[in-house]
Amino acid sequence: MSKTSKETFYISTPIYYVNDIPHIGHAYTTIIADALARFNRLRGKDVFFLTGTDEHGQKIEKAAAEKGVTPLALANTVVGRIKDLWKALNISNDFFIRTIEPFHEKGVQKIFLRLKEKGDIYKGTYQGWYCVSDENFLAEDVPLQPEGDKICPDCGKRALLVSEECYFFRLSAYQEPLLKFYSENPGFVRPPGRMNEVVSFVRQGLKDLSITRTTVKWGIPVPDDPKHTIYVWFDALHNYLTGAGYDWDLKKFERFWPADIHLIGKDILRFHAIFWPAFLMAAGFPLPHTVYGHGWWLKDEAKMSKSKGNVLDPHVILKTFGPDPLRYFLLREIPIGVDGNFSHEGFLHRVNSDLANDLGNLVHRTLTMILGYQKGVVEAGDDEQENDRAIREGFEALKGRVSELFEDYALSKALEEIWAYINAVNKYLADNEPWKLAQDGTKKQRLARILYQSAAAIRGISYLIYPVMPGSAQKIWNLLGETKAVAEEPYEGCRFENLRTGTKIQRPSPLFPRVALKDFLQEEVPSSAAPKKEERMDIINFDEFKRMDLRVGEILKAEKVPGTDKLLKIEVNLGTEKRTMVAGVGDVYTPEEMVGKKLIVIVNLKPAVIRGIESQAMLLAAETGGKAIIPFFDRDVPAGAKVK
Ligand code: MSP
């Protein structure tokens, strides 16, 4: 019954509740899954990417009642919104499962009966604290009051101790088999820290699980005993079987089961890493290969939730930027195992710096030069010199590395490496100064070679970013004269020299619009600069240091800020863009003497408005006796070069 072929790849997202519309946190899980699905398709795998909705249970019943609609009507509306969002985000799922569909309900009932016959499901009595007002059993960890009863944490009313007939799943019998399975399959739960969490939880002992309710109507009826409905988690987890064809498309099911990866948020780890494998063991199915618990996106350091009022609606960003900048940001900003704090400044900085500057400019200037100097036709030019070879070989090495990192779910690192290559190509252009070669009629062949290397590198880059930014990748691909879809080129076959000479390229328009923070937020940027830190500093690791984007800046203009003693407004050239900054150095330096000097600036610091001027970068200086002394470069370095 289990698949033997390594050619398939089955990836799932959790199925989303339909009590409310999805936010950026939900989009995150789906975007990770989409990037992995697309990557595996490029690798030539037969991919099955499943997502869908979790539509039964009390949560939905209650939300519908509050809105005065039926649960089905609410579910239909929210499902529509979820599907629209996935479309707007360019999600390429192969199937969308809804748990209200008959094939799913039948599949769950069949498994329920199988476990009942086997004795792993039995009827018993559940005793617990019941909130009549909420029609809900309180969680076991709600503390006892001094009077010996419990208060409902949701509505504050006194709960009643009641006994209810229900069916139990014999989870206690699976404690040892689970522990054995974890020790034989240490990669089952990832990242590894989460595996430790699961193992220590199971070691503490597992109690049998109540898996039916008589108080919930909106659920799958227990076969032969319909006054009970099946508990929503028992119902929902089985979507991974029924969605893949269990009991209605057995050919498909045999091809894809067991899943390669169930991608989930860390909040639902126990359900997936403990209950789910126990259910599967009981029913005799092979177990999934990996359960990956990703971190949360926080807003203002708290998990997004409607009750906290801190949810971010992805549509706001999608309207201005389209899907790719958001996809890129979410996958690039944090490794998928850890939490990240979402800020609009952080988002905008990444988009402006990595997408508009680094990638956008590389594409724009390379293609513009091919159009301007070679009538838009790709030529091979001279033989490769050493630095040209480094660009070609750099791509081949990068391709191997990106593949390893994707296999390891290290998407952020893969993007980091792709961007290091983008910047190497930018540097190659800056070092070789093709715009100067174009002035010299004898250097045409050399010029053509440099432009070929850059364009071939761009073709390769667009291929590698395809899983994360499919739309932009395809756009760049088409600019380079390709007519087929990126995804038609197999990973192994994507070579640097696939850029054919004689190809006619298209005129580029900006790929990633630059948006100013104030237009994006439509509110004031904080007007005070960061307060000064105490002298004693914490030890930081290299990764933290690397988060600072330090660049060589060349001062183009400097002038006094009127009405201040020492503030200068400075315009600085960063190689690919100009920025304005305000610095308190006018008591040491005159504006005239600063022009033409090169210095170090940090370019990814949150902008600050100083005296009404937005300072978009900060220069580095030594402070002594209240004066700022700037370390200028004593050798020539190109503006924009990275300082590290
Ligand atoms: N219906 C269950 C899953 C059943 S799977 C058999 C559920 N649904 S959910 O809609 O509440 O959440 C779905 C996923 O979104 C979870 O993986 C959850 O971790 C993720 N996220 C919800 N908010 C999130 C963030 N703020 N950040 C990242 N992911 C978060 O749970």
Image: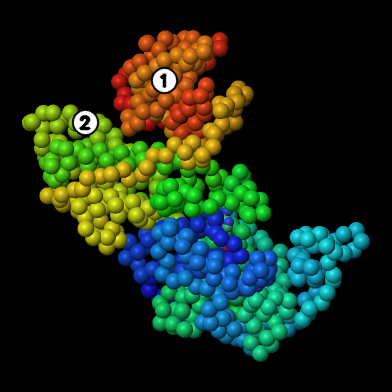
| Location of residue 594 with respect to 403 vertically, above or below | above
At label 1, counting other C-alpha atoms closer than 10 Å, the crowd grade (few under 14, some 14-19, many 20 or more) is many
Tell me if 468 is positioned left or right of 144 in this view.
left
Image quadrant containing the C terminus: top left
Residue 148, percent across and down?
90, 63
- The residue where tag 1 is placed is 570
Tell me if 85 is positioned left or right of 510 in this view.
right
Question: For the point 59% across and 46% down, which residue is it?
Answer: 299
Spatial CA span between label 2 and label 1 = 26 Å
Question: For the point 63% across and 70% down, which residue is it?
Answer: 69
- The residue where tag 2 is placed is 433
Label 2 is placed on what type of residue?
Glu
Question: For the point 48% across and 19% down, which residue is it?
Answer: 583
Mark 1: secondary structure? strand
Q: Choose between 456 and 507: the one closer to the eye.
A: 507
Residue 116, percent across and down?
65, 85
| Location of residue 350 with respect to 433 vertically, above or below | below
Closer to the N terminus: mark 2 or mark 1? 2
